[in-house]
Amino acid sequence: MFDIQTKYVFVTGGVCSSLGKGVSTSSMALLLKSMGYTVNVVKVDPYLNVDAGTMNPYQHGEVYVTFDGAETDLDLGTYERFLNQRMYRTSSITAGKIYKSVIEKERKGEYLGQTVQVIPHVTNEIKETIRKAEEVEGKKVDILFVEIGGTVGDIESIPFIEAIRQFSLEVGRRNCLFVHVTLLPYLKSSDEIKTKPTQHSVAKLRELGVQPDIIVCRSEKDFSKQELKKIALFTNVEERAVIKSLDVSTIYEIPLLYKEQELDKIMCEYLNIPYKTPDLSFLEKKINILKNIDEEVTIGLVGKYVELKDSYKSIHEALFHAGIENKVKVKIMNINSETLSEEELIEALSKVDGILVPGGFGRRGVEGKILAVKYARENNVPFFGICLGMQIMTIEIARNVCGISEANSTEFDPKTPHPVISLLDEQKKVTMKGGTMRLGAQKVILKQNTTAYEAYKSTEIFERHRHRYEFNPEYIPIFEDNNVVFSGFSENGLVEIIEYPQNLWMVGVQFHPEFQSSIFQPHPLFVDFIKASVSFLRKSPD
Ligand code: GLN
């Protein structure tokens, strides 16, 4: 639509982490996308893991899986959900990935005769790797956003800041924009918003050679023009380019908040690109629906890492999208399957209108999850099992419906006499942990006249995977004899979806539908699960 050369927006973080830099980056990208520009986003994580796949969700939050099978930081999920477009593996860079590549090149002799150093070898590798994301699905994008993880001042992020400084010189400073997202802490005792940490953080950034053009100030309290002026003066940024980003009831209000402060115009002006009013009417409509919702449905999320919301971030988001679609607020009740006693679990489950068992690994907390499936089945509560949740549903039905009392997954009991869930053939020789699961999107063929088909209204879908175990096909006949419906298979015959139609709504999927839901396109399975939960709620006596 516009004929421009690729422009770059670099986003850094100041003062502390968890400021919602991913949401800020996505909101800015959405403003430009809503003008008609094509965009892509890269997340740079300064840790030494090659990807996020081997990290504990308690430390790092959920592992987000891209369509092409990369295990990435959860910010990629935020980008996809805001922009309603796919991110690919080129959108995820870690220090580990960069160093691995530099060391492999060194071993191959590509730097023969040279001393391999952070500058220029690592910084060159960073620049080249960033540029790989300029092209998406065969086309060069108009604007590439690059979010640098961590906080300015961290030892780990220094080579990355140096690389983006060099980058801006190479592609031309007028083709780049530096945005610094920072925190203005509020001091209760003096009832003040403090700007000093921001001043220091920008000073640190400038020391590394980067002068920000725009400062986005996260703050839980509103602040005066006085503070804005002070930040502008001390950080050497135009006053109008110091943007307030106050806490909001939903993150989807942030692009609107930025637009009110004309951040959209400022970005275009600084990047020397034509401005067009961004069309955000769709978002406005959704926010309007959200503000007028009064019914609430409660979903029990039964897992091991439920205390940390980020561990199941995409699930939380997908439930939220499905809630808006059904015009209900979804309240999530976290139910820890590992620490609660049987009575406590049942007590918690008796308060919910739908039960969801998400993905997971290892045997801890498994028996609690099996109990949750049993409760759902016996009390006709809508149930949604995702990946491990589907495998748990299989074990419960095997034990308590098919009468195979010793049924288990070989993940939890390698010697079980009834391995209803067993290792995928392709996994049998795998010894390395990183990036070796069945990963990414695969075609799933759906059977008509099933709950799954009812939701998707299509016989062919693509869903993302991340697992090593599968439904053992030897057990299909006995399950079918006990009213289980196999409604989806992969092209090479792996079981992808099971249903138990005796229940109001009971579906288990081997894939992760939560990665493909957005406010623009809520996922059909989540939409129908919430719909069933609402009908359960309305039928309940109290
Ligand atoms: N642990 C199970 C497997 O590897 C489930 C994985 C998951 O839930 N992502 O098959």
Image (cartoon, rainbow, N blue to C red):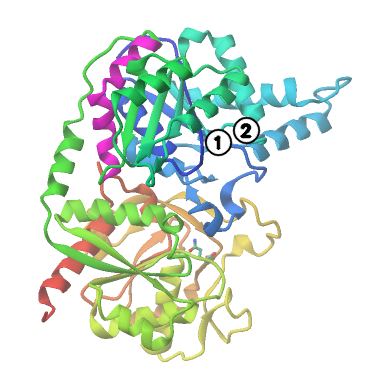
Q: Amino acid at mark 1?
A: Thr
Label 1 near ligand 1 (CB < 8 Å)? no
Q: Quadrant of the C terminus?
A: bottom left
Q: Nearer the viewer, mark 1 or mark 2?
A: 1
Instruction: Name the residue at 21% across, 56% down.
Output: 323
Q: Dot 2 surroundings within 10 Å: few (below 14), some, or many (20 or more)? A: many
State the extent of the magenta-drawn residues as a range.
Answer: 250-270
Q: Residue 479 magenta-drawn? A: no
Give the vertical position of 377 relative to 290 (above or below). below
What residue sits right under mark 1 in the picture?
Answer: 151
Q: Report the disc number at residue 157.
A: 2
What is the quadrant of residue 56 in the picture? Answer: bottom right
Label 2: element kind: loop
Where residue 54 sits: x, y (%)? 61, 54
Horizontally, residue 196 falls left or right of residue 28, namely right
Q: Nearer the viewer, residue 208 or 266?
A: 208
Give the vertical position of 321 relative to 107 (above or below). below
Q: Amino acid at mark 2?
A: Ser
Q: Name the main secondary structure of what is drawn in magenta.
A: helix
Label 2 near ligand 1 (CB < 8 Å)? no
Q: Nearer the viewer, residue 375 or 496?
A: 375
From mark 1 to mark 2, how far is it between C-alphas?
8 Å
Label 1: element kind: loop
How many badges with numbers are in the image?
A: 2
Earlier in the chain: of badge 1 and badge 2, it is 1
Q: Are marks 1 and 2 in contact (CB under 8 Å)?
A: yes
Give the vertical position of 280 relative to 390 (above or below). above
Q: Which residue is farthest front?
A: 190
Horizontally, residue 78 falls left or right of residue 456, namely right
What is the quadrant of residue 75 in the picture? Answer: top left
Instruction: Name the residue at 52% across, 81% down.
Output: 408
Q: Is residue 482 visible?
A: no
